[in-house]
Image (cartoon, rainbow, N blue to C red):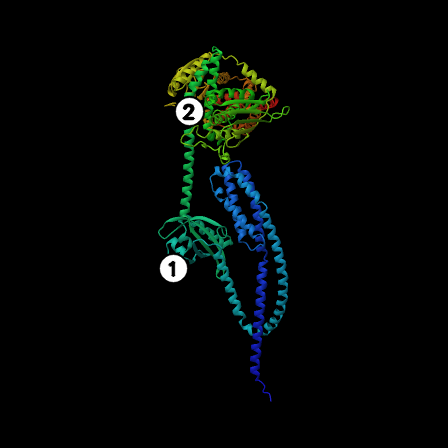
Amino acid sequence: MKVKAPPGRKKIWARYLLILALLAGVTVASYIALDVWNRIRALDSAQQDHADWVFSQLEIEYLKLDRALDRARSGEADDLANLRKRFDIFYSRTDIAARVRNIGGVGTEIEDLRAVLDTHIPLIESADDRLFGDLDALQETLRQIEGVPREIALASIADAATVSEEERHQIVRLIELLLVIVMLVTIALVVAIIRLSRQAKTLHRTSLESQQNHARLASTLRASLDAVVVIDESGTIRDFNGSAETIFGRARASAIDQNFIDLLIAPHLRDHMHENLAKFRTTGETSYSDTGRHELEMIDRTGRIFPVELSVSLARSADGPVFVSYIRDITDKQQKDREIVQARDEALAAYREKSRFFAMMSHEMRTPLNGVLSAIHLLDDGRLNDEQQKFLDAALTSGDILLGHINDVLSIERSESDTDDQQLQACDMTAVTSGLVGTMEPLARTSGARLHLDQTGLTDRPILTDPRAIQQILVNLLSNAIKFSTDGDITLRASYPTSGTPITYLHLEVMDDGPGIPPEDIDRIFDDFVSLDSSYERRTGGTGLGLGIVRRLVQRLGGDVRCESEPGYGSTFTIRLPVTAPDDAGIQVQAELHETLPEQPKLHLLVVDDNEINRDLLRAMLERLGHTVMLATGGQEAVDLAAADRFDGILMDISMPGLNGIDATQAILSGDGPNRKTPVVAVTAHALPNDRHRFRAAGMSGYLHKPLDTKALRVALGDLISSETPPQTNTDAAYGVLNETQIHELLELLGREKLLERIRTLTRNVEHDLPQLMQAETLAHLQTRSHAMAGMCGMLGAEKMHCLLSQIETACKDGDWKKARQTVDLLPAVWQQTQTAWNQRNL
């Protein structure tokens, strides 16, 4: 007979079975759900997008690096710095790609790519000159790996697609199984819900507390600076961590429940912070929370006010909103920033000192050279026989070359300024190259070398270029060839494009049969101070600047230079310069200007120079031109003579002991003597770009550059005579709209394109400044603007505008407001006439 189990025991077994089934179902469902969860996370769009983005960025950063490399060929420091930055970014992208999930068969390619980049890290971290010299090698390496980033990106996409497809199928199967289990578990749960309902309220409360704690923890993790201070909406401190104790020198217990603003904020900022907190309590808006990092000043327990970096996050709790503040002491950081700024200022000061040194050295070197060349010019009086004239011409040519050397020592300084001092003019390259070879032949004979000239590619058509720059380029190349080709042959070859086509470039070659240049040295021979003959018994002299100057001059002319050489078989330097052919009218005008110089009236001139040789030579040159000259040995003597005698013009040296030329000019022009309106021309060796601006600002009417020649002196005196024409009330009768002589000289000096560019600049300046000049309400304002505009117009041959503006300036100096305003009213019509005259001349 079977014994039945008691009903209570059956309920217990049923309960145990229910619990066991529930646990088993939950366990299986949890396992499957966890598996599904993990697989879904693997397919999470954000992660996938991140991976795809990483590999796509790898290709994009490669392209940016390649573009930066192309820009770096300019040699500019900013472009080289940008190349380094793009290389670092591409390297970091490669490193990130290597740490991203497995991407199939391209993991090896990523490691190879990173290995290639590792080999170029020393080059990227090297100096600018080495980096610039090895750009070709770097570009060749990039070309070898240019397909790797794209292969990695494509492989990543294909691999991700395959894995995603497999994972989706597997997830579907698991979800189907999970649904079955969930249904079973749901049935069990329905039975258990009744028993668990009593615990629902407690579980709900626990869940809310857990969410709040989670939100507070998340807010804490969003900003992780050194000190953490938690405050409520009233500003009361609720938490104060150990780093805060260290920074502020306060124990946590003494800070809790204190007002954050009154305790820790610097006194001068407390009102502002209280206003922000009150605004939050009223509107719910805040100026600091979740808006990034802010810099302000705080105060510690000792009263020390120090700068901090503050980041604030807003969190919500059951007790209301709280602010989690993250604070970092940046005293050391600001000190380092100040040191960086100080170092920059010191570097700029050193640069300015270097510029001053160059200016001083230029003056000191030009002063004796002025005496030498001026004396030689005095010998050129037409009474020399052919042999003597030949020697004199050779001396003048050598002096010009020496002057070019002095100028080119300053080429680095000048290249950093915006001033373009190219002297473009029409010249015959046949004559230039022939004369240059004739000048260099004595030097070649001394070394036993033989000079040859190949002009078969030249024509008799002149070109518009800078002949002095071309002369300096060829002198440096031929000098180098002569040094290294003792008892050898040297050939200068010059040519234009094929006959019959417009002249667009000049092709120059200097070939020698010397020892040649090793391939590893080709890229560095154009660097400054590089000399391949570095032995103690050096056979060749020089500073190593020659080829560096050649490169700068060629680049300034818009061309390129390259060297081809093989050890033991000589070297060939090839230069390609863009040139233009001047129009026939321009050539004819220049020829006329060179052939005839107008006779000048006799002038009474004051020459001021502290150098006795310069004074005597300049007086001799002026007296030969028919003028009377009075000499002054310094600035103060010039001021005294100008106060006692009336001069037609003053030629003023700049660098003199005691009262310098600028101060002396200002004293003469601002005084009440007979020369307060006399033109003053600067005669100096100062060569830096900002010097001429200083001369004009001092009131000087012109500029003559030492060493002088007779032609430049005659031109300057001609300008001085035209500036002395007395002002007339009827400007139409007294002056032409344009000074045709000056326009011709500007065309000869600058060329049509450069002159057009400067006229366009003048037009922009006048159209900008003229309305302000018309609206000037004080004599001082009107005088300042008319003086500045008069200088610009006078320099570019706008004679009528220049004369009107000069009359305005004179009226202002005399205090005649009515006359000044009447003359101002004439300016718009005369400016229109000036523009029409330029247009009629195609300017």
- Which residue does the numbered mark 1 point to in the structure image? 253
In this rendering, the answer to whether 223 lies above or below 633 is below
Quadrant of the image occupied by residue 430: top right
Amino acid found under the numbered disc labelled 2: His
Residue extending farthest left: 302
- Count residues near mark 2 (Cα–Cα under 10 Å), then give few for <14, some for 14-19, many for 20+: many
Mark 2 or 1: in front is 2
| Res 589 seen here | yes
Residue 191 image-quadrant placement: bottom right
Residue 815 shows in this picture: no
Instruction: Report the front residue among 577 and 744.
Output: 577
Mark 1 element type: helix
In the image, residue 25 lies at what x, y percent?
Answer: 58, 71
Name above or below for residue 792 compared with residue 214. above
Q: Which residue is mark 2?
A: 363
Q: Give residue 717's mark.
A: none
Please, which residue is most extreme toward the bottom here? Answer: 1
Spot occupied by residue 289 in the image (x, y as percentages of width and height): 49, 53
Left or right of 681, for residue 587: right
**If you read the primary sequence from the N terminus, does the residue marked by circle 2 or circle 1 appear first?**
1
In this rendering, position of residue 600 left or right of residue 661: right
